[in-house]
Amino acid sequence: MNTKQLEIQPNVYYTLEEVATLLRVSRRSVAQLLENGIARGMKIGRQWRVLGRDLLQLTQQDELTDKQLTEALMRLSEPAFARVWDNDEDAVYDRP
């Protein structure tokens, strides 16, 4: 494994190949991230360019997405918990 430090500069535009090297993934993986809108970039003709700032924000976007997903699942489960815990049969265990 290459131990050379790779630093992402926020105000530099990177090619697909450079992004793949920085993220240590395949060129195709980077293309899929861009095509699916997971990573931000711009297409100039047939070439992709990605701003370093957008690469640095990739992990933050994933964390936000995970947090939003967890909150959505919790909201969906609230009615189920209410039915299980707040019912007449369970009322004898409720404290005043």
Image: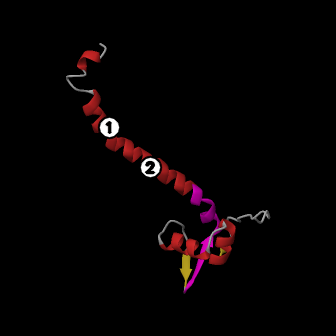
Outermost top residue: 96
Question: In the image, is residue 15 part of the stretch drawn in magenta?
Answer: no
In the image: residue 9, left or right of residue 94: right
Residue that label 1 marks: 78
Q: Residue furthest bottom?
A: 45
Residue 25 picture location, percent across and down: 63, 69
Of marks 2 and 1, which one's residue comes earlier in the chain? Answer: 2
* Residue found at x 22% / y 26%: 87
Verify CB contact (< 8 Å) between mark 2 and mark 1.
no
Q: Exactly how many numbered labels are in the figure? A: 2
User: Type of residue at label 1?
Assistant: Glu
Regarding residue 15, the answer to whether it shows in the image is no
Task: Give the residue at mark 2.
Answer: 68
In the image, residue 56 lies in the stretch drawn in magenta: yes
Indicate the position of residue 17 as horizontal and vertical percent values.
66, 77
The residue segment tinted magenta is: 46-59
